[in-house]
Image (cartoon, helix red, strand yellow):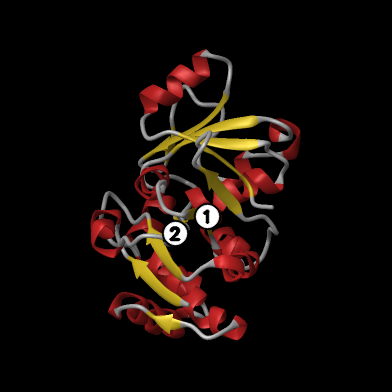
Amino acid sequence: MTLDLCPSPALYPFYKKENDTVIVVDIFRASTTMCAMLQKGAKAIITVATTEAARQYKSDGFLVGAERNTRKCDFADFGNSPFDYSRELVQGKEIVFTTTNGTMAIEMGRNSRKLYIGAFSNIDALINRCMDDSERIVILCAGWNNRINMEDTLFGGAFAEKIPEMGVVTLGSDSIRIALELWQKAKNDPLAYLKQSDHYKRLINNGVESDAAFCLLHNTVSVVPEYNKTDKKIRASK
């Protein structure tokens, strides 16, 4: 098996290959939030790239989570915090979801052989799922407006450190090697390491600093969100 990492959606065409298993990662906060939704019993997640599309779904009676530039959109039922989605509100429901970066990355990777949503919160379950039938895994980092960020890259390093425990893995490029070295520097206290990062500062400026610590916790959920190419919905992988 080969493992690689695409550090920005803008670079994805240069990493994309046939028959890839793609893991979309947006640690602060979309991928963590999607894992939380499904863990709380949401039936499915419908990701859309634009707020206009999300507004249309809202007018059609759907529950909508929408965020731009770290802030909840004024028309939405939820924002992009994993704490927004309680079991009482989402169980058995389909949730429409749009965010600044994460849902755009899903749009880019949706034609891959398999597309999963990854976070620290489901990292072990995700590794187990990927080991079942993957020849090449590409971690697609959502970044920030097509720029590289630290937190998504750190996840790639954590994944690269853990996955060899399950089998023989070849690192596919310098990108995943850099991520692994970064994680080895940060892993004893990743929150402290990220306090100088751009997105951590955005979370502070918008009053959601507490989300950061939660998004860095390992294995708080057991679900692996998987994109279905037929109906374009994300459900817990079976």
Q: Residues within 10 Å of mark 1 (few under 14, many from 20)?
A: many
Residue 90 falls in image quadrant: top right
In the rendered image, the vertical position of residue 118 relative to residue 95, given as above or below: below
Camera-nearest residue between 22 and 70:
22
Judging from the image, what secondary structure is the residue with disc 2 in?
strand
Residue 77 appears anywhere in the view: yes
Camera-nearest residue between 230 and 22:
230
**Which label sits on residue 22?**
2
Task: Quote the CA–CA distance across marks 2 and 1.
Answer: 6 Å
Q: Earlier in the sequence, mark 2 or mark 1?
A: 2
- Residue at 44% of width from left, 79% of height from top? 183
144 left or right, relative to 75:
left
Q: Residues within 10 Å of mark 2 (few under 14, many from 20)?
A: many
82 left or right, relative to 160:
right
The spot of residue 40 in percent (x, y) is 71, 44
Judging from the image, what secondary structure is the residue with disc 1 in?
strand
Instruction: Give, as a three-letter code, the residue at label 2.
Output: Val
Camera-nearest residue between 134 and 9:
134
Residue 127 falls in image quadrant: bottom right
In the rendered image, the vertical position of residue 4 relative to residue 231, given as above or below: below
